[in-house]
Amino acid sequence: FAYSLVRQHFNVLFELVDQHNGAVVKTIGDAIMAAFTVPADAFDAAIAMQKQMQVLNQQLNLVEPNQLILKVGIDAGPCISVTLNERPDYFGMTVNTAARVQGLSKGNDIVVTDSVLVDLKERGNSWEQNEVQLKGLAAPIRVYTLRLYGEKFSAQELIV
């Protein structure tokens, strides 16, 4: 059952990344790293993924604490692109920041940085703002969380 669940999870994520003009770079355990050229496409893919995970949980009759949850972090900016073993991969501060921001997610939400939010402000979503100190960064940065399902978390300063 577990293998089938992981396959369904990946099938949903891969399909939605592709539908939103992105490319899956690699899998990391049960997570994926995807690249997009437009931050809004990454955000739209994340919204679609969160919605589809809710559908998949219902279809599989999964209830808490056994539901599939997504923790999404998005950053935008320059990165280094290389090809390793005939596959593209990305490195640099943007990639590291996205991974660290994803670590702030509580699940069923999307956490983004200033560089992503600038493309999304006109959408009128209600964002929770936090200032965080991320490992590897000299100064704290602002991150914004859009909670999609469940209780709203209160804004708080986080040290990670």
Image (cartoon, rainbow, N blue to C red):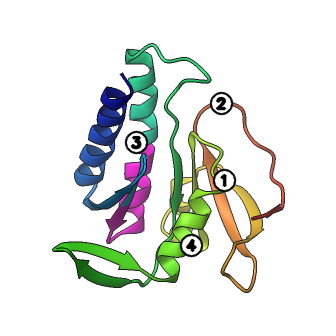
Q: Quadrant of the C terminus?
A: bottom right
- Total count of labels: 4
Name which residue type carries label 2: Gly
Q: Is residue 116 magenta?
A: no
What x and y, as percent, mark residue 99?
53, 65
Q: Residue furthest left?
A: 86
Q: Give neighbour class at mark 4: few <14, some 14-19, many 20+ (Cα, 10 Å).
A: many
Q: Give how far apart the Cα atoms at labels 2 and 1 are.
A: 15 Å
Residue 150 badge: 2
Q: Nearer the viewer, residue 91 or 129?
A: 91
Q: How far apart are the alpha carbons under marks 3 and 2?
A: 16 Å
What residue is rendered at 65% in x and 45% in y? 106
Q: Which residue is mark 1?
A: 127
Q: Alpha-carbon neighbours of circle 2 within 10 Å: few (<14), some, or many (≥20)? A: few
Q: Residue at x 24, y 44 (%)?
A: 15
Q: Which residues are magenta?
A: 34-47
Examine the rendered structure and indicate whether residue 115 appears above or below residue 58: below
The reply, left or right, for residue 116 in relation to residue 127 is left
Q: CA distance from mark 1 to mark 3?
A: 19 Å
Q: Dot 1 lies on which element?
A: loop
Task: Check residue 97 in the rendering and tell me which mark sits there, or answer none.
Answer: 4
Disc 4 or 2, which lies upstream in sequence? 4
Which of the image's four quarters has the N terminus? top left
